[in-house]
């Protein structure tokens, strides 16, 4: 019997070492998985931050009718220049929300608000299309791009706008 016990004690040592190796591999895998998850969460946080800043730029632009009126009338210098966008700082300077005191800090390097494009128009219900002064329901697309070079996060957001305007404003 002593011979069987000696053979078993060697086998117990081998099984124990094998289990120790397996447990060590599990621990290493969990640490790597935890690090990978932290990187994924950080990337998602950066992406959501850039998206929120782009959406905020749209809200600032649409908060004031003056922005849209400048676009239609082409009175604003950026609307008539060769570039069809305005930067966030210019947008904030020209169309600062009521009650705001200073421009908020942004993580994005470049936020560009592109000039709204008129998609189509139709005569407003209850008016004759033959009348030259009948209001029209106009449909516009406004886009904003934002990017952050530190994280590589970038986004492009489109906002649809329906607005009733006097005839001839949607070209």
Image: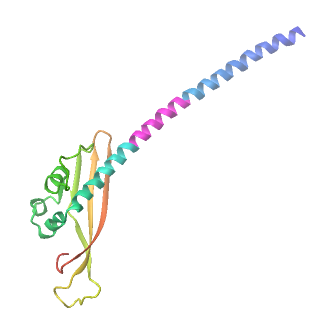
Tell which residue pokes out farthest to the right in this image.
Answer: 1
Quarter of the figure that contains the N terminus = top right
- Residue 131 locus on image (x, y percent): 18, 90
Vertical comparison of 116 with 24: above or below: below
Q: Nearer the viewer, residue 25 or 96?
A: 96
Query: Is residue 156 shown in magenta?
Result: no
Q: Nearer the viewer, residue 50 or 124?
A: 124
- Residue 83 locus on image (x, y percent): 15, 58
- Where is residue 91, by image quadrant? bottom left
- Residue 78 locus on image (x, y percent): 12, 59
Asked if residue 19 lies left or right of residue 1, the reply is left
Q: Nearer the viewer, residue 27 or 98?
A: 98
Asked if residue 5 lies left or right of residue 22, the reply is right
Vertical comparison of 80 with 154: above or below: below
Vertical comparison of 162 with 53: above or below: below
Total residue callouts: 0
Quarter of the figure that contains the C terminus = bottom left
What residue is shown at x 76% (from left), y 17% (from top)? 12
What residue is shown at x 44% (from left), y 40% (from top)? 40
What residue is shown at x 13% (from left), y 65% (from top)? 70
- Residue 49 locus on image (x, y percent): 33, 46
- Where is residue 162, by image quadrant? bottom left
Asked if residue 93 lies left or right of residue 125, the reply is left
The magenta stretch is 29-43
Vertical comparison of 41 with 100: above or below: above
């Amino acid at each position: 019997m002593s011979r069987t016990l000696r053979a078993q004690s060697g086998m117990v040592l081998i099984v124990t070492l094998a289990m120790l190796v397996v447990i060590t591999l599990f621990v290493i895998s969990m640490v790597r998985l935890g690090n990978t998850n932290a990187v994924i969460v950080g990337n998602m946080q950066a992406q959501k931050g850039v998206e929120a800043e782009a959406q905020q730029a749209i809200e600032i632009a649409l908060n004031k009718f003056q922005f849209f009126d400048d676009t239609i009338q082409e009175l604003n210098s950026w609307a008539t220049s060769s570039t069809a966008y305005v930067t966030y700082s210019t947008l904030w300077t020209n169309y600062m929300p009521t009650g705001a005191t200073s421009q908020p800090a942004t993580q994005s390097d470049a936020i560009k608000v592109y000039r709204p494009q008129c998609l189509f128009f139709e005569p407003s219900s209850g008016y004759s299309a033959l009348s030259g002064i009948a209001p029209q329901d106009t449909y516009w697309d406004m886009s904003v791009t934002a990017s952050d070079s530190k994280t590589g996060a970038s986004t492009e957001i489109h906002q649809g706008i329906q607005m009733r305007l006097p005839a001839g404003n949607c070209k």
